[in-house]
Image (tube, rainbow, N blue to C red):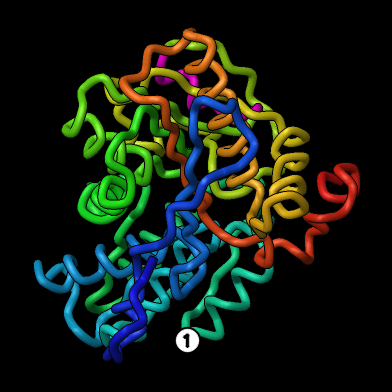
């Protein structure tokens, strides 16, 4: 995890180097580990792309100091970009579909950003369109566009992937949720360079359409899990099917059961996307143990993207009916 044996000059110096911790519920002979991204300063994995992408955009001259970052986001990316923008001398405007976490929107505003809501029915596609409209109206504005910008994947290739291998010499499988897909693609690309036989699995909510990338039938439906999944694969330009062996659709109820178990039994206070990732990681570990998946090592690594504290107002620790209603 982040070292604290010296004074740091900025909160951006605390991004990354998050702990890799064993998940205790799994087959005895296949270990499961989770990268705990709530240890980042903005408490999510999106802090990584916030710092990395804005630094690169400034270096390239895509936006100048004093310019504006406009981004469509479900929340965590906005927080990550807001933390970085504040430190790098940029203004920030975020376009957020109405249905997403109020806690996240409050934190974005607390960090000095402007938040503009779009109708839930318009989805992320509507938020993306509105963000580009706003950027066109401003002088010196840029839309980093986490859904299509290769810097998203690059951030995880340069940071998250190497950190996993610094902590764990042998990785048999990588399992992670896909929203933009940048996290999994960056880690997968790095993992396959270490061992081309590394098994890679994507995680999506049941009702999401990511499986279509691998030619699988999917029935589109609503889901409660936040931060991962897609209703329109045209917006997920970063997903690279050739890097993925399987895609696991996880029902809301299973993710909710697992996030509650992780808190009660293992002390992990995580959101629903982490619950879904844990369900899939445990399934992959069991398949490796049973010989159904031929992984190069008896270990599975996943990512817990954020904290349950972002979702307390939505009753995340209540009954499934309370949370999903």
Query: Which one is nearer the viewer's eye here, 224 or 163?
Result: 163
Q: Quadrant of residue 117?
A: bottom right
| Residue 151 shows in the view | no
Residue beneath the point at 48% across and 43% down: 33
Which secondary structure, mark 1?
loop
Q: Is residue 34 magenta?
A: no
Which residues are the magenta region? 206-214
Q: Quadrant of residue 109?
A: bottom right
Q: Is residue 77 above or below residue 174?
A: below
Please rate how many residues cluster around mark 1, counting C-alpha atoms within 10 Å: few if below 14, some from 14 to 19, many from 20.
some
Residue beneath the point at 53% across and 32% down: 281
| Residue 299 shows in the view | yes
Query: Which one is nearer the viewer's eye here, 61 or 126?
Result: 61
Residue 306 screen position, x and y as percent: 55, 59
Q: Is residue 112 above or below residue 278?
A: below
Q: Is residue 154 left or right of residue 310?
A: left
Q: Is residue 92 above or below residue 236?
A: below
Residue beneath the point at 73% across and 36% down: 252
Q: Residue furthest left?
A: 60
Q: Is residue 42 left or right of residue 259?
A: left
Q: Is residue 309 above or below residue 231?
A: below
Residue beneath the point at 47% across and 86% down: 112
Residue 95 screen position, x and y as percent: 50, 64
Q: Is residue 303 left or right of residue 68?
A: right
Give the residue pinned by disc 1: 112
Looking at the rendering, in which quadrant would you find the N terminus? bottom left
Query: Which one is nearer the viewer's eye here, 41 or 179?
Result: 41
Residue 323 screen position, x and y as percent: 83, 50
Residue 232 screen position, x and y as percent: 49, 33
Q: Quadrant of residue 23?
A: top right
């Amino acid at each position: 995890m982040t070292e604290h044996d010296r004074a740091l000059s900025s909160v951006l110096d605390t991004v990354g180097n998050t702990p890799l911790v064993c998940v205790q519920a799994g087959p005895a002979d296949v270990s499961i580990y989770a990268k705990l991204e709530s240890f980042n300063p903005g408490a999510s994995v999106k802090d990584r792309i916030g710092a990395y992408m804005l630094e690169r955009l400034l270096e390239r001259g895509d936006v100048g100091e004093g310019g504006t970052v406009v981004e469509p986001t479900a929340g965590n990316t906005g927080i990550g970009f807001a933390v970085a923008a504040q430190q790098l001398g940029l203004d920030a405007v975020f376009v957020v579909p109405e249905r997403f976490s109020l806690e996240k929107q409050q934190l974005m505003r607390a960090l000095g950003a402007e938040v503009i809501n779009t109708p839930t029915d318009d989805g992320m596609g509507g938020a993306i369109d509105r963000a580009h409209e706003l950027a066109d109206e401003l002088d010196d504005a840029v839309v980093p566009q986490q859904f299509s910008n290769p810097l998203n994947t690059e951030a995880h290739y340069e940071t998250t992937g190497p950190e996993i291998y610094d902590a764990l010499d042998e990785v048999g499988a990588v399992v992670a949720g896909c929203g933009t897909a940048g996290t999994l693609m960056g880690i997968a690309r790095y993992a396959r360079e270490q061992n081309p036989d590394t098994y890679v699995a994507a995680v999506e909510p049941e009702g999401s359409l990511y499986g279509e990338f691998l030619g699988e039938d999917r029935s589109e439906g609503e889901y409660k899990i936040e931060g991962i999944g897609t209703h329109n694969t045209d917006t997920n330009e970063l997903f690279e099917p050739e890097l993925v062996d399987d895609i696991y659709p996880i029902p809301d109820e299973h993710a909710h059961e697992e996030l509650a178990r992780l808190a009660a039994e293992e002390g992990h206070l995580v959101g629903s996307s982490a619950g879904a990732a844990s369900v899939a990681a445990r399934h992959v570990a069991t398949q490796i143990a049973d010989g159904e998946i031929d992984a190069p090592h008896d270990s599975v690594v996943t990512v817990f993207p954020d904290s349950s504290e972002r979702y307390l107002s939505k009753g995340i620790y209540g009954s499934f009916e309370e949370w999903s209603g």
